[in-house]
Image: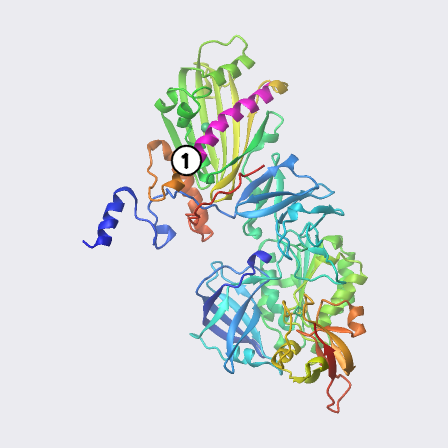
Amino acid sequence: MAAHNQEVWQRGRVIEADYVATDIKRIVFEPTLPVKAAPGTHLTVAIEIDGAIDTRSYSIVASSDDGTRLTLSVFKTRNTRGGAILMHNLKVGDSIAMTQPMQNFPLRIGAERYVLVAGGVGVTAMVNMARVLREIGANYELVYVGRNREAMAYLDDLTALHGNRMRVFVDDEGNSLNVDKLLGSIAEHPFATETELYMCGPIRLMDGIRRSWASHGLNPPNLRFETFGNSGWFEPEDFIVRIPRLGIETTVGVGSSMLEALESAGADMMFDCRKGECGLCEVRIIDLEGEIDHRDVFFSEQQQRDNTKMCCCVSRGANPNAANGTRTVITLDVS
Amino acid sequence: MTLLENAAAKQSIRSRPVGNTPTIKNLGSTTDKVLNFPLNAWYVAAWDYEITRNPIARTIAGRPLAIYRTEDGKAVALADACWHRLAPLSMGKPVGRDGIQCPYHGIVYNSAGRCISMPAQETINPSATVPSFPIVERYRYAWVWIGDATLADPAKIPDMHQLDDPEWVGDGLTIGVNCNYQLVLDNLMDLTHEEFVHSSSIGQDELSESDFVVTHDDTTVTVTRWMLNIDAPPFWRKNMRDKFPDFEGKVDRWQIITFEAPSTICIDVGVAKAGTGAPEGDRSQGVNGFVMNTISPQNDRSCHYFWAFMRNYRLESQLITTQLRDGVSKVFKEDEDMLEAQQAAIDANPDYEFYSLNIDGGGMWVRRLIERMLEAEGRPASAQPEHAHRAPKAAR
Ligand code: FES
Ligand code: FES
Ligand SMILES: [Fe+2]
């Protein structure tokens, strides 16, 4: 909702902090300017890394009615950048700069039926939605997908709260989600055209659901998703970008985006959303040694296959077949 | 005494201490001059007939809306600001069964406010949505809910059933009034003003002379006034003669005003031949009307005042329906003029406060119920002071 997207900065004091799954820390903040966080909202925190201020956005997992308790969950991966580590080190009593809740993923009240699909840490965007749907007596189903139970935050809480409205799929237990089967059941349901599916999770899961949604002929605008926090098809790795016209060659490390690397190399870059939605950061690919991990939702699948343009805020070079350490090299031009 | 204290002491002669009131609960008085409006409430956005496939613009409770109907006849209320560059969707045009196209760069939204087509790209940005507000048609009105949609229960729509009940007929209009909505509520909760504002139609001396009773519960306030054995003022003499052509003589007159929070007031009004038992419940020797009023704040200094006059006699006569609508409309014009003059005086005298009379009993309970709603929403009772806030006239 555009209306709630102004950044209003405040301070948040940590009042609780604990681990809710392997590498996932739950942190409860008491903000100085409390407002109740609606389902689907996130907030941005400002943190200092190596002397520079950087920002990170996190879904709001829970909010008290008066907004004086806001819960975030912070996931630490192998390739975690400084931000998550810093967040993980927060202790009760610490205080950081944060915005008030902002909305990019509104839950629409009034659909006949809802299916929520959470993959891994993507569950953080779904916890509050599921709770609200339960409270208003909506017809909903929560599908929670993860690698193993230890890595799945809030599993017990969600199971206790949602009972048989929740279905759990765990890869390591040989019980993976069959996306086509799930979407087939949605398409056959009497409320098929009135069903809204909200999802947040890894890009493989979201791409799979997007394709299956289309192939089942389901109503496109009823598929709701948020891209922030997207992982790629491949693990991030170092790669090289060149802009011959500007005499730039730089290595993009796992901890930064291609956009950031090009900016620090001196290119004057245009961008807006920085999450692969708006297309403003597109660059033209002149030559490519290796592959591109397109992580945006701006280009169509065909455009992504063409490999003539990419959204440099999220997409990366990848070299899935090269175990020998050769790095992808992308040669491009910018506007 | 320092200069500052001196000034403060002088000031307090006329104005009450304001500002820095620590919490809403501590407010002793309930006379904010510019009362805030609750957001968790159903407000009338439009008459049913105003909503067509082509969008109209209307601001309700501070939120500009584009309101239209789908091909299937369902009313839709979207935020009147495109996701892209905030161009008003109310200037857009209908597309397909339920869509609306932004007039500027052509983004198309469906009735849920989701983008279904985006210019110059093959995909659709998943963030591209505009808020869609709950809207329900009931009693010839379309009611919207601007606040927390999870609380939007249609059972909370105020009772205005006379508007579409087969036992009643009548019609009404909308008035855009440049005043805080609460001034209209005050006006309707105390009909003593009829004697002074509406002296040629429904006013009479007995109004300020007769006693009245105020009662309330959690969501309603009722003011009851009976005037026995009086002359009928011109408006009521005419109505009596519509039903009893030869009518002469004294009447018993009643006004039973019922407020339903936050801004609906239905007034049971009428007269009956004096001494025929109307106060005891036998109204057969009289005429009965219901003045249906519901006021939707546009912003803190303007409102849409939706009203109708319904009657339960001579149901067959369109002539009487039109006469009553036009007659009441003239009466309400007198209120409109007074309310706008009052608001202008309030704004021109920011350092003066309100004081109360015993006739304000009903209005004061109304304020208290509204302030409780605001407190429950965690919002201040007083609207932000906005200077020189001359909004365009509400509703048409
Ligand atoms: S900045 Fe929007 S897609 Fe990259
Ligand atoms: S402002 Fe609506 S499409 Fe640009
Ligand atoms: Fe009046």
Q: Position of residue B124 (x, y in %)?
A: 72, 61
- Identified at 24% across, 53% down, the residue is B4
Q: Residue B283 or A216: which is nearer the viewer?
A: A216
Residue A180 shows in the view: yes
Quadrant for ligand 3 reads top left
Q: Is residue A312 magenta?
A: no
Dominant secondary structure (helix, strand or loop) of the stretch shown in magenta: helix
Identify the image quadrant of residue B125: bottom right
Mark 1 Cβ inside 8 Å of ligand 3 = no
> Residue lying furthest left in this view?
B1
- Identified at 74% across, 42% down, the residue is B71
Residue A159 shows in the view: no
Left or right, residue A210 beside residue B269: right
Q: Residue A238 or B166: which is nearer the viewer?
A: A238
Mark 1 is surrounded, within 10 Å at the Cα level, by few (under 14), some (14 to 19) or many (20 or more) other residues, namely some
Residue B166's place in the image compared with A141, above or below, is above
The residue carrying mark 1 is B342
Q: Residue B26 or B130: which is nearer the viewer?
A: B130
Give the extent of the magenta segment.
B320-340
